[in-house]
Image (spheres, rainbow, N blue to C red):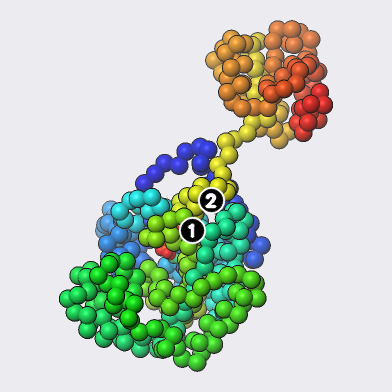
Amino acid sequence: MRDILPPESGRWRRFTAVFADVVEAAGYQQVIPPLLEDLGVFTRIGDATDVVTKEMYDFVDKGDRRVALRPEQTASVCRAFAQHRPPVLPWKVFYSGPNFRYEKPQRGRYRQFDQVGIEVLGVDDPMLDVEVIALGWEFYRRLGLQQVSLIVNSLGEPDDRGRYVEALRVHFEAAGEELTEQSRITLAKNPLRVLDSKRGPDQAFIASAPQIADFYSGDAAGHFDKVQAGLRALDIPFTVEPKLVRGLDYYRSTIFEFQGGTFESAQNGLGGGGRYDGLVEALGGPATPGIGFALGVDRTLIACDDEGCFPAVPLELDAYVVDVVGGLEAVAITSELRAAGFTVDRSFENRSMKAQMKQANRSGARFAVIVGQTELTEGTVTIKPMGPGDQFNTPRTEVATMLASIQNDPQDT
Ligand code: HAM
């Protein structure tokens, strides 16, 4: 778990703001689920996933309830949907915030990590899948990332998926002891997830495994074709990856992943999502189709660093108030300038003029607004550009107007 300090923290806030801009423009509204839920909400994610079996921060609370810190937010959103039954469908929501998984920490993998994401409940239309994927794509574009690639797959209708899973079981069971022990455990729970193994000895069996496309029903193939046609219509480049299964068990039909170009493969998933028709039902709601994605904030920002886009910018101060006549002038001037919309800081503890000017310099402010004994007597302030340009006096009552007029081009003074 990490502290996110300034100026990095400012970048996190802008990240979420840009995401909100992109998805609000498409009619998504924010939902704020709790960080902690009944454990049962998350066990619905699937018992063949490490997220549930190994990585959950779960404990018994003081009321003897089995609870867990959320490892992701899709299950929480579906629980909220089942509980509140929003009257208007589709229910289009977005979210942001921390999630917890007890993973082995490394670059791009943390035990507390943030996601931004969207979920849409109540509509089963391939064009919605296209909208969802396109919004993720557009967000990466807004950040300035160039090296993100999109991979898509379909897990078919539940029946197709069932027959495929059975074929995989037969295939992997034939490998016997040659499959890694971890994969044999996964195989017993969900053969599909064996395809996700990155372990060397498993690779030959994964390469020769049956292909999902051979199991699609007409409906599933039609849905997936339309998704691909929609992406092409939007000029969004993608690759169909038949072995993509994603790390959570609730997925059906369309699934996708956004991968970064600058990472080790185990951490290159910048974000991903898919359809999870059936999850709302599992959480006690009516049968409801659903689709969404979540993008990892920590990882996407590392990708931004690697690609040199969306940098952290230190807070920029417009003015730094230097008051050597007791500090009350600085109280009034900072308050007045802040109310007028400027970003303003000041010195405390009645330091000397020299010490305050040093602070002003270090603050990076564009101007120092100085009040000494002469200015106080005359009813003026001195405005000193901290870069090139000469200092000058202005009536105390006009300090905000003057700053506004010189802000864009201090050379004019
Ligand atoms: P996920 O693939 O588990 O999907 O996580 C989405 C993204 O969260 C990953 O691509 C990655 O960027 C980030 N992430 C996951 N674990 C970590 C970690 N330990 N450290 C840093 N970043 C991490 C989900 O969570 C689904 N709820 C997505 C979804 C939404 N599907 C449908 N709707």
Contact, CB < 8 Å: mark 2 with mark 1?
yes
Q: Quadrant of residue 165?
A: bottom left
Say what amino acid the circle numbered 2 marks: Glu
Q: Read off the residue under disc 1.
A: 261
Picture coordinates of residue 323, whole percent (x, y): 65, 15
Query: Which residue shows up at 39% across the image and 44% down it?
Result: 2
Q: Which mark is residue 307?
A: 2
Residue 376 showing in the rendered view: yes
Mark 2: give few (<14), some (14-19) or many (20+) Cα within 10 Å.
Answer: some
Q: Is residue 337 above or below residue 23?
A: above
Q: Is residue 75 above or below residue 211?
A: above
Mark 1: give few (<14), some (14-19) or many (20+) Cα within 10 Å.
Answer: some
Query: Which residue shows up at 31% across the image and 87% down it?
Result: 167
Picture coordinates of residue 290, whole percent (x, y): 50, 75
Query: Which residue shows up at 41% across the image and 73% down it?
Result: 244
In depth, the one of 81 and 358 nearer the eye is: 358
Q: Where the C terminus falls, by quadrant?
A: top right
Q: Quadrant of residue 337?
A: top right
Picture coordinates of residue 62, whole percent (x, y): 28, 53
In depth, the one of 86 and 238 nearer the eye is: 238
Say what amino acid the circle numbered 1 marks: Gly
Task: Say which element carries label 1.
Answer: loop
